[in-house]
Image: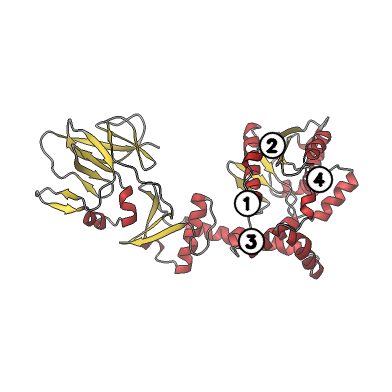
């Protein structure tokens, strides 16, 4: 059986495992469920059919009826959930449905202590996906998001039918008398995927009946090239979190890369960090080059917080980060810095006012912007640096300044970040 070869060739163990199968009730997922059911006796694994009713069609109830009838007396567990109508957006319903569907699959997999998640994507889906991404972005990294083996959170996501054509799955259902429901909305040309399916893919298959194999080869080659690129980028020193809203990297780290390669590096980093695909303009993000450093942050930064009083040894928040200032090590937290201040001072924290002068050891003062520049911190990020005040006097500015007016009654304070 072809599906057994999928697991054997990739050395994916099935014995005593739990498999959660995304089951829509359509011909593809029902074929997958039946193939796995026939394989179960040999490998003794558990099957869970996970079905989400999107509540987008009046006849959607037929899907769960077909699934329940099939799974009855086969010891296949069925999990059914409804996508609440009040959560349906006015625009982008397709993307929202997909996001909720995968959220449902993830929750089901965790609840059932699954080993693998499986979907019934096939060769025709792969062709459509490549064409879709080519039309919308042309980004190679988006064209290979349908892989036979990938990861979804902590689970292995498997697509064992990816090398099979949809026609072969229909034929399998017919030969084995497998029930299924046809989603009539797939016959409509109101969405791009359907238009490609009905009008473009048939023409391509007419030109070359083996175009599906070429699509699979293309996807595998893209995946190989992207993995080589990722391996190279991962060998470089990685950007470090900076003041909670950005990442910082010495420009020299990328000095061996061309400009195009540097952009590709940041695209890869954004994908790995925020799971977002962006174009060459890094849309939605800002890349700043300043005083020997790259700074990457989102275009929309958090609203700045006002100054507030704090107590020593009590946790406080500042710009979506949590801290403790203490004279000793707390039970939890990561030491990030220290400063000196009067023993019984009243402390407050906040951003540093623009044009603020900082006291120096010699009794003079220096403009804060000069200290920020000396420490290579660009204007945009300066308000997000934690500033600490003791009795109204600035005693610490993150990455920038430490109290220089040290007297006999002053003590050392430690700043810990709470993860």
In the image, 274 versus 186, the foreground residue is 186
Find numbered disc 4 in the image and state the secondary structure of the residue it sits on: helix
308 on left or right of 297:
left
Tag in front: 1 or 4:
1
In percent of width and height, residue 349 lies at 27, 39
Q: CA distance from mark 1 to mark 4?
A: 29 Å
Circle 1 sits on which residue?
A: 92
Tag in front: 3 or 1:
1
Q: Residue at x 77, y 53 (%)?
A: 186
Circle 3 sits on which residue?
A: 133
Location of the C terminus by quadrant is top left
Tag in front: 3 or 4:
3
Q: Are marks 2 and 1 in contact (CB under 8 Å)?
A: no
Label 4, residues with CA under 10 Å away: few <14, some 14-19, many ≥20: many
N-terminal-most mark, 3 or 2 = 2
Q: CA distance from mark 3 to mark 4?
A: 27 Å
In the image, 208 versus 377, the foreground residue is 377
Q: Residue at x 65, y 36 (%)?
A: 109
Question: In which image quadrant can residue 223 be found?
Answer: bottom right
Give me the disc on residue 82.
2
Circle 4 sits on which residue?
A: 31
In percent of width and height, residue 53 lies at 72, 39
Q: CA distance from mark 3 to mark 2?
A: 29 Å
């Amino acid at each position: 059986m072809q599906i057994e070869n999928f697991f054997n060739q990739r050395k994916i163990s099935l014995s005593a495992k739990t498999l959660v199968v995304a089951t829509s009730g359509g011909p593809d997922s029902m074929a997958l469920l039946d193939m796995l059911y026939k394989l179960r006796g040999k490998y003794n694994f558990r099957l869970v059919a996970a079905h989400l009713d999107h509540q987008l069609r009046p006849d959607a109830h037929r899907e769960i009826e077909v699934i329940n009838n099939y799974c009855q007396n086969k010891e296949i567990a069925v999990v059914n959930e409804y996508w609440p109508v009040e959560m349906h957006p006015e625009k982008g319903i397709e993307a929202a449905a997909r996001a909720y569907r995968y959220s449902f699959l993830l929750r089901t997999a965790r609840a059932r202590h699954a080993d693998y998640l499986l979907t019934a994507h096939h060769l025709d889906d792969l062709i459509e996906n490549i064409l879709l991404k080519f039309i919308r972005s042309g980004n190679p990294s988006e064209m290979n998001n349908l892989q036979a083996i990938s990861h979804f959170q902590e689970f292995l996501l498997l697509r064992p039918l990816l090398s099979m054509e949809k026609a072969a799955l229909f034929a399998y259902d017919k030969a084995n008398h497998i029930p299924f429901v046809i989603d009539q909305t797939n016959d409509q040309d109101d969405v791009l995927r359907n238009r490609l399916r009905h009008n473009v893919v048939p023409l391509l298959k007419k030109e070359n009946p083996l175009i599906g194999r070429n699509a699979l080869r293309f996807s595998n080659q893209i995946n190989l090239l992207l993995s080589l690129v990722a391996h190279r980028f991962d060998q470089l020193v990685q950007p470090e979190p900076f003041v909670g809203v950005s990442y910082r990297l010495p420009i020299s780290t990328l000095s061996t890369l061309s400009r195009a390669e540097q952009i590709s590096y940041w695209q890869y980093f954004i994908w790995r960090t925020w799971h977002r695909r962006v174009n060459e303009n890094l849309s939605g993000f800002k890349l700043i080059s300043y005083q020997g450093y790259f700074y990457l942050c989102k275009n929309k930064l958090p609203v700045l917080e006002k100054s507030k009083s704090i107590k020593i040894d009590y946790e406080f928040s500042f710009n979506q980060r949590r801290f403790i200032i203490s004279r000793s090590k707390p039970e939890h937290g990561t030491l990030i810095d220290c400063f000196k201040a009067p023993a019984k001072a009243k402390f407050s924290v906040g951003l540093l006012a623009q044009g603020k002068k900082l006291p120096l050891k010699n009794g003079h003062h220096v403009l804060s912007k000069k200290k920020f520049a000396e420490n290579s911190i660009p204007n945009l990020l300066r308000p997000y640096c934690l500033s600490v005040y003791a009795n109204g006097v600035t005693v610490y500015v993150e990455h920038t300044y430490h109290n220089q007016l040290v007297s006999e009654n002053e003590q050392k304070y430690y700043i810990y970040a709470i993860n």
